Image: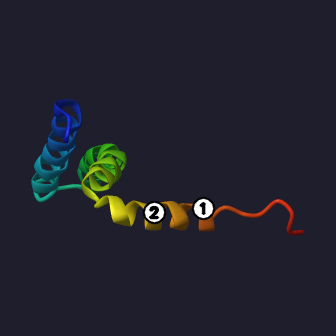
C-alpha cells in the first residue's frame, strides 16, 4: 500500500505546484514571472520521482515485467562496437 510518507510528499509537491501556478498570473514584470516559474519547477521536480514510485506500486504484477523489459531495452550492450 501507499505509505504515508510518499503520500505526504506527493500531496505537498502538488500543492506547491498548484499554489505557485495560480500565483503566476500576478506578477507585473518578467523577473517576477521567472521567480515564480522557478518555484513551480521546484514543485514539479520533486513530484517526478514520487509519481513514478506511486505508479509502479499500483501497477498490476503481470505488467511489471513489461516495465522491466522496457528498462533493460534502453541499456546499451557493451559487446557491440
Left or right of 8 on screen, residue 33: right
Identity of the residue drawn at 86% across and 63% down: 79
In the depicted structure, whether residue 26 falls above or below residue 69: above
Instruction: Count neighbours of disc 1 (C-alpha within 10 A) and say few if under 14, some if 14 to 19, many if 20 or more.
Output: few
In depth, the one of 25 and 72 nearer the eye is 72
Q: Quadrant of the N terminus?
A: top left
Q: Position of residue 15 (x, y in %)?
A: 13, 44
- At 21% across and 30% down in the image, what residue appears? 5
> Does 20 sit above or below residue 64?
above
Helix, strand or loop at mark 1: helix
What separation in Å lies between label 2 and label 1 (alpha carbons)? Answer: 11 Å
User: Relative to 73, is 11 above or below?
Assistant: above
Give the percent coordinates (x, y) of residue 37: 28, 52
Residue 28 spot, x, y in % from top left = 16, 56
Residue at the disc numbered 2: 65
Label 2, residues with CA under 10 Å away: few <14, some 14-19, many ≥20: few
Q: Between residues 71 and 51, which one lies in front from this camera angle?
A: 71
Q: Quadrant of residue 11?
A: top left
Task: Give whichever of 48, 38 is nearer the camera.
Answer: 48
Q: What residue is drawn where x is 77% and y is 63%?
A: 77
Q: Secondary structure at mark 2?
A: helix
Q: What percent of the width, then of the height, locates residue 63?
A: 37, 66
Is residue 11 shown left or right of residue 66?
A: left
Q: Label 1: which residue?
A: 72
Q: Hey, which residue is sitting farthest front in the picture?
A: 62
The number of numbered badges drawn on the structure is 2
Q: Quadrant of the C terminus?
A: bottom right
User: In the image as oriented, which residue stretches furthest toward the top?
Assistant: 5
Q: Quadrant of residue 74?
A: bottom right
> Looking at the image, is mark 2 or mark 1 earlier in the sequence?
2
Q: Residue at x 31, y 45 (%)?
A: 50
Amino acid at each position: 500500500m501507499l505509505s504515508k510518507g510518499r503520500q505526504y510528499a506527493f500531496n505537498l509537491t502538488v500543492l506547491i505546484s498548484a499554489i505557485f501556478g495560480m500565483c503566476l498570473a500576478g506578477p507585473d514584470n518578467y523577473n517576477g514571472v521567472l521567480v515564480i516559474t522557478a518555484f513551480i519547477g521546484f514543485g514539479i521536480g520533486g513530484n517526478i520521482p514520487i509519481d513514478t514510485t506511486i505508479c509502479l506500486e499500483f501497477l498490476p504484477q503481470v505488467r511489471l515485467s513489461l516495465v522491466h523489459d522496457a528498462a533493460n531495452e534502453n541499456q546499451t550492450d557493451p559487446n557491440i562496437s
